[in-house]
Image (cartoon, rainbow, N blue to C red):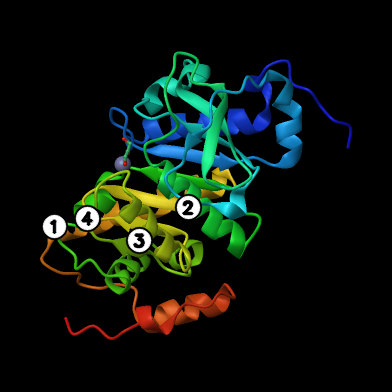
């Protein structure tokens, strides 16, 4: 393939896809103030297409060690920046960073033109991009959003993977097909902390979705569409459950475990049996 050069970084399709996702997330109501963050592990050919626009700043410690991401490049939202503003002025609100050869430091190469740092959730983003890359090289996107219905459920449901997975699967027939591995739940932790990064990365060994109690959701995927779609689907299911719980003390009828097994069979997916437990209510 002939190497394309973009006159400006903003012309590159991966940057446009990134900006579109920040706008979509804001339009959904998931990014009040500076809430949420997004990162994308760039492909080598994408790096080459924009490299001429790089101006390297000083190396800074990442706070975690991500050797499997050494010498890789990432597009990400800035710390304290508002998703709402990204589409108006991407260069002031997002940045391209490079991870050094040891996986312990990074530097800004483009963006954050008025100053600033990469996302406050940098440890979670890089640690989880590393976990996912080791599972499958195609994972490139990590997204954190303040989804209100998912968060509301963390006040009323037990904080267990089994309960959250099963309840979300029951709310929309597509859910088990969209996230057949289920969802993980991380108890309340300090935003931006190492502890939150580590606990999330344990869930990301198994799932593409982790719910952060009383905070929001964290997702990983191959591209912007599928990662956004994952969060959109889980949040929609949570919204329906919130409505149901607001209308009546319990469900009159629901999707039963046998029906989930039938669905899995028809869609040729496997659903872990630990989520298909018998309920006693
Ligand atoms: O402000 O959402 O979790 C960014 C965040 C931190
Ligand atoms: Zn957050």
- Give the mark, 1 or 3, whose residue is nearer the N terminus: 3
- Give the mark, 4 or 2, whose residue is nearer the N terminus: 2
Q: Nearer the viewer, residue 6 or 178?
A: 6
Point out the residue furthest to the left here.
249
Q: CA distance from mark 1 to mark 3?
A: 34 Å
- For label 2, the residue is 127
Badge 2 vs badge 1, beta-carbon distance below 8 Å: no
- Quadrant placement of the C terminus: bottom left
Residue 30: numbered disc: none
Indicate the quadrant of ligand 2 in the picture: top left
- For label 4, the residue is 188
Residue 36 pos. (x, y %): 36, 38
Q: CA distance from mark 4 to mark 1?
A: 28 Å
Q: Quadrant of residue 275?
A: bottom left
Instruction: Kindly identify the residue that appears in the image at 39 percent across and 44 percent down.
Output: 144
Q: CA distance from mark 3 to mark 4?
A: 11 Å
- Report if residue 222 is visible in the image: no
Badge 1 element: helix
Badge 2 element: helix
Q: Residues within 10 Å of mark 2 (few under 14, many from 20)?
A: many
Q: CA distance from mark 2 to mark 1?
A: 41 Å
Residue 9 pos. (x, y %): 65, 21
Q: For the residue with label 3, is its CB less than 8 Å from the closest atom of ligand 1?
A: no
Which of discs 4 and 1 lies nearer the camera? The answer is 4
- Give the mark, 2 or 1, whose residue is nearer the N terminus: 2
Q: For the residue with label 4, is its CB less than 8 Å from the closest atom of ligand 2?
A: no
Q: Nearer the viewer, residue 182 or 1?
A: 1
- For label 1, the residue is 247
Badge 2 vs badge 3, beta-carbon distance below 8 Å: no
- Give the mark, 4 or 1, whose residue is nearer the N terminus: 4
Which of discs 2 and 1 lies nearer the camera? The answer is 2
- For label 3, the residue is 199
């Amino acid at each position: 393939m002939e190497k394309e050069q973009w006159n400006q970084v903003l012309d590159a399709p991966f940057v446009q896809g990134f900006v579109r996702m920040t706008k979509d997330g804001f339009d959904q109501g998931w990014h009040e103030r500076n809430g949420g963050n997004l990162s994308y592990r760039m492909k080598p050919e994408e790096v080459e297409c924009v490299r001429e626009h790089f101006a390297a700043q000083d190396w800074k410690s990442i706070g975690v060690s991500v050797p499997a991401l050494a010498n890789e490049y990432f597009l990400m939202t800035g710390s304290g920046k508002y998703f709402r503003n990204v589409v108006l002025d991407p260069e002031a609100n997002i940045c391209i960073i490079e991870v050094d050869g040891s996986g312990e430091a990074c530097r800004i190469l483009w963006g954050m033109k008025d100053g600033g740092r990469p996302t406050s959730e940098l440890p979670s983003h890089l640690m989880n991009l590393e976990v996912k890359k080791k599972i499958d090289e195609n994972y490139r996107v990590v997204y954190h959003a303040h989804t209100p219905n998912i968060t509301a459920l963390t006040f009323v449901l037990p904080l267990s993977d089994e309960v959250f997975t099963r309840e979300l699967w029951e709310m929309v027939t597509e859910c088990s097909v969209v996230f057949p591995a289920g969802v993980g739940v991380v108890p309340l932790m300090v935003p931006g902390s190492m502890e939150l990064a580590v606990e999330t990365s344990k869930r990301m060994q198994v799932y593409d979705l982790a719910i952060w109690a009383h905070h929001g959701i964290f997702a990983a995927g191959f591209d912007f569409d599928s990662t956004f779609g994952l969060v959109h689907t889980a949040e929609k299911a949570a919204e329906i459950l919130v409505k149901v719980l607001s209308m009546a003390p319990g469900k009159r009828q629901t999707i039963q475990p046998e029906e989930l097994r039938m669905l899995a069979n028809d869609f040729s997916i496997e659903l872990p049996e630990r989520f298909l437990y018998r309920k006693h209510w």
